[in-house]
Image (cartoon, rainbow, N blue to C red):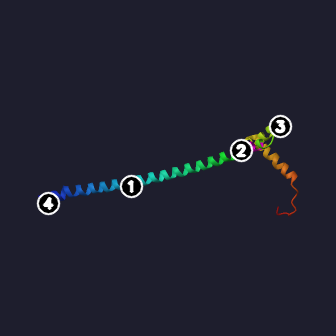
């Protein structure tokens, strides 16, 4: 009778509890691994956004710094300062796009024609 109690109840209970403990351990390992992957992906995205934001800010601040240096280096009239400020406006705006087209056209008009043939 003692032997049948072990065979019928105790061994299946031990086997079931062991299986549950092993399954919960693997599940915990899987959760910790997925958390680590999510954290690394979030850090990577944050680093990308930080780098992109810093480069955009540098691109916007650089013309203003150059403008400040030009204004400090020589005595200029108000009209010259306004023209310089207009050229140093940061950010994409319709006037900026027109100014770039105008600048490109003036560069093309001033530059000599190329004599390199059809590959130009």
Q: CA distance from mark 2 to mark 1?
A: 53 Å
Q: Residue at x 84, y 51 (%)?
A: 107
Above or below: residue 12 compared with residue 69: below
Residue 120, x across and y down, in percent = 82, 61
Instruction: Using the image, tell me which numbered label, if any, was put on residue 96.
Output: none
Q: Earlier in the sequence, mark 3 or mark 4?
A: 4
Q: Earlier in the sequence, mark 2 or mark 3?
A: 2
Q: Residue at x 23, y 55 (%)?
A: 13
Instruction: Using the image, tell me which numbered label, if any, was put on residue 77.
Output: 3
Q: CA distance from mark 3 to mark 1?
A: 71 Å
Q: CA distance from mark 4 to mark 2?
A: 90 Å
Q: Residue at x 76, y 42 (%)?
A: 72
Q: Which residue is most to the top?
A: 78
Instruction: Using the image, tell me which numbered label, if any, was put on residue 65.
Output: 2
Q: Which residue is mark 4?
A: 3
Q: Are marks 2 and 1 in contact (CB under 8 Å)?
A: no
Q: Are marks 3 and 4 in contact (CB under 8 Å)?
A: no
Q: CA distance from mark 4 to mark 1?
A: 38 Å
Q: Which residue is mark 1?
A: 29
Boundaries of the magenta span = 61-70
């Amino acid at each position: 009778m003692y032997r049948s109690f072990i065979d019928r109840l105790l061994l299946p209970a031990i086997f079931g509890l062991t299986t549950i403990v092993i399954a919960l351990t693997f599940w915990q390992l899987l959760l910790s691994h997925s958390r680590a992957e999510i954290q690394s992906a979030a850090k990577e995205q944050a680093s990308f956004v930080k780098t992109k934001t810093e480069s955009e800010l540098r691109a916007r601040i650089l013309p203003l710094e150059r403008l400040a240096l030009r204004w400090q280096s020589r005595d200029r009239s108000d009209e010259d300062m306004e023209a310089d400020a207009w050229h140093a406006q940061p950010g994409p705006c319709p006037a900026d796009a027109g100014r770039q087209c105008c600048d490109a056209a003036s560069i093309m008009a001033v530059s000599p024609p190329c004599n390199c043939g059809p590959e130009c």
